[in-house]
Amino acid sequence: MCVLRNIVGLTFIACLQALSEDATLLQSEHKTQETFLDLDSAGAEIVLNHTPLLFLDWSMVDGGQIDWVGPDGNTLPLNDPHGLKSPEEAHPIPMGVPSGVAIRAQPAEKRGVFSDLLPAEFPWEEGKRKAHTLLFDDSAKVYRVWYDCAGGLAYAESDDLKTWRKPLLNASAFRDQPSTNLVYIANLDACRESGMFQRPESLAVAASGTVFVDPSTDPSERYKTTILASATPEKLKAFAESKGKPLSSRVSEVSANVLFPAVSADGVSWRVIPEPDFLHDADTQTVVFYDTRIKKYVLYTRLWEFGRRSIGRSESDTFLDFPLARPVLRGGANESAVVDFYANAMARYPGRDEVHLMFVTAYDRRVENSAIRLASSRDGVLWDFVSREAILLPGAANDWDSHFVIAPPSFVRAPDGDLMLLYNAYNYPHKFPRAGFVEGNQGTARWKADRIAAIEAVEEGYFNTPRVTLQGNKILLNVQTARAGEVRVELRDASFAPIAGRSFEESDPITGDDTAIEVTWKGSGDLSALNGQRLHVAFRMRSAKLFAVYAE
């Protein structure tokens, strides 16, 4: 809560707003019960199989321990009598304690513009095309994209990101074309009649929201999005009071911008629900998805905290009613005082629904430029940056992407195995007088397969994985070393003792650059005798990056 005498420079009005925000959060908290996952590794089994183990945080690095031994070399008890005559007789032996390694996000490689991936076929697609949401629908094994073009927002799908199908499901004519793939609101008349909207004619599909495929619902509502729209203030206030729901302090009594849900069976024809589902003026890029692990809808959006942008999260049993969001990623004291965290572009790692990522726009107020940084989470609630390095920076002074960069939800695995992200960019600072000067486009960025982050040893480094259950007959590494660098691997039992024939001394050094190099010991990588066993995988590294580990 806010105490006036202890906050220097905070105006009385600002303090009241802070108090109001606290109060609304407290009101919303007692009406929702958040779901938290149990991430205690003691009760979890980590499987080493064909799904890559990634290094986005320290979860795949065992912290190790110190083993205290006496003069006879035996481990000393913690609390029982030990027989020592002085403390100097106890000697520390590190057991699996990592050293010399760091986890770092890896920079993306820019690969041209999105319009080259999605060629124009129709007159309404003239000019630049920019994806609003790109996703891979795993159930249908197809890429789906909603993209901005000259005619508005359109929908297309592809099996390979090269050949696109553009279903002409909109019966409204465009010039001499009787139908289009432009999305539209099918129940616009009902929205007008509801009286909820100040300007129903301005309703637009996915306005400040992104599209997702809902695996839990009826096919008639398979596609979902949120629409930021200006509600009639009187109607909005009455709605909030009737539901006992607080309004965010960001909601203006003049514009009353809040989020409304919209659903679709085909991705083209949309039905807006004329009752808001999130009473907050999100303004910038709200991402919603259905989390199959906790069986709830989860929403990420932009918040303001004492004048700085941050990222908030809300969850709900239903798509129609989200409580106000609470902050999950903000600038702490170890971040620059001039940087806001803007849009989130939250995504789950392809093939790894439990791995959550955010492609965060870090906005620098000094120069009004931005960079994209990578954050990760194991539960979707607690977020940290993988490292301080940006994964994507603006281009050079005269490039089309020279200043402000921001990622839309678009993180997918390409058919060739690469990871791909789209980014919007502009050639002038964010708040520069825009009319007639500022131009924008959308670029594509890529990483080699699973190389979005790495555990690195610049010089000598060492670490163990937690205990993993081996499901395979060989271990493969996605690795890159300097010419004079190397990686060696040792397999260890539960007490960190080397397994016979699989020690560091017998390990064949791994050098070079390979996304799937087999680990061998004296020329043999056959681990069929260890298949199904629980073990630690230990690494000695020198001038090397390790991106992922998996088994076959």
Image: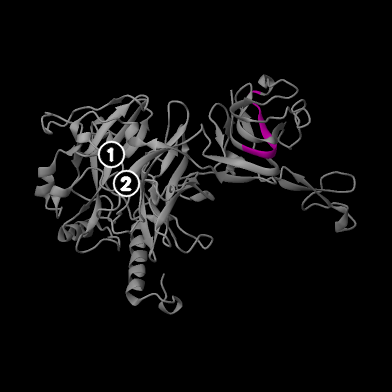
* Pointer 1 residue: 128
Q: In this picture, which residue range is highlighted in magenta?
A: 531-545
Q: Is residue 543 rendered magenta in the image?
A: yes
Residue type (three-letter) at the residue carrying disc 2: Gly
Residue type (three-letter) at the residue carrying disc 1: Lys
Residue 268 image position (x, y, % from top left): 21, 34
Q: Tags 1 and 2 in contact by the CB under 8 Å rule?
A: yes
Which residue: 26% across, 61% down? 251
Horizontal relation, residue 361 to residue 232: left or right: right
Is the residue 20 above or below the residue 422 in the image? below
> How many labels sit on residues?
2
Q: Quadrant of the C terminus?
A: top right
Residue 239 image position (x, y, % from top left): 19, 56
Residue 295 image position (x, y, % from top left): 38, 39
* Pointer 2 residue: 440
Are there few (<14), some (14-19), or many (20+) residues within 10 Å of tag 1?
some
Which residue: 69% across, 46% down? 100
Residue 255 image position (x, y, % from top left): 20, 60
